[in-house]
Image (cartoon, rainbow, N blue to C red):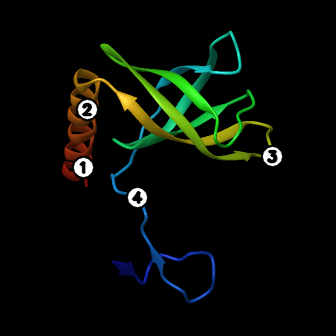
Amino acid sequence: MEHPAESNGRKGQPMIERRRHPRIEVSHPVLYFPDISPRPRVATTVDLSMGGTKLVTPYGLISGEDLGISIAIYPQVIRCRGTVVHVFRSPNERLTAGVRFEEMSTQDRTYLGDYISSIMEQEALTP
């Protein structure tokens, strides 16, 4: 569905929302495990959905890279596999990466869904 208020960056042209899952803006600590590195690296979520997350990290990532991911959402840690779909480097040299979730246990998927729903409900009640 097209929304006139949304723009695709070209003046006057509407944008079509491509995401299947609503995103919430939340900050959670993350450890990610690149398949090409023996050491975990740290990041922080910028947003989160059932389909993926946007991460901010001082470390390098490559589009198409596969990761093991652990996201601390108190009192649980969500563990999953994901693929980097896009990468941007900001002027302050921090890297922002969009990551699509590929594999997640049923228990973690349920916990994540309940968490996202509760945040969306809180946001709906806040004027």
The local secondary structure at tag 3 comes to: loop
- Calculate the distance from the C-alpha at mark 3 to the C-alpha at mark 1: 33 Å
**Residue at point 22%, 52% (across, down):** 124
Q: Position of residue 5 (x, y in %)?
A: 44, 79
In the rendered structure, the answer to whether residue 10 lies left or right of residue 28 reads right
Q: Which residue is mark 4?
A: 19
Instruction: Tell whether label 1 touches label 2 (CB within 8 Å).
Output: no
Q: Nearer the viewer, mark 3 or mark 1?
A: 3
**Residue at point 73%, 28% (across, down):** 58
Instruction: Tell whether label 1 touches label 4 (CB within 8 Å).
Output: no
The amino acid at mark 4 is: Arg
- Calculate the distance from the C-alpha at mark 2 to the C-alpha at mark 4: 19 Å
Q: Which residue is mark 1?
A: 126
Q: Which residue is mark 2?
A: 115
Other residues around mark 4 within 10 Å, as few (<14) / some (14–19) / many (≥20)? few
Label whose residue precedes the other's in the sequence (2 or 4): 4
The mark found on residue 56 in the picture is none
Q: Which residue is mark 3?
A: 91
- Calculate the distance from the C-alpha at mark 4 to the C-alpha at mark 1: 24 Å
Label whose residue precedes the other's in the sequence (3 or 2): 3
- Quadrant that contains the C terminus: bottom left
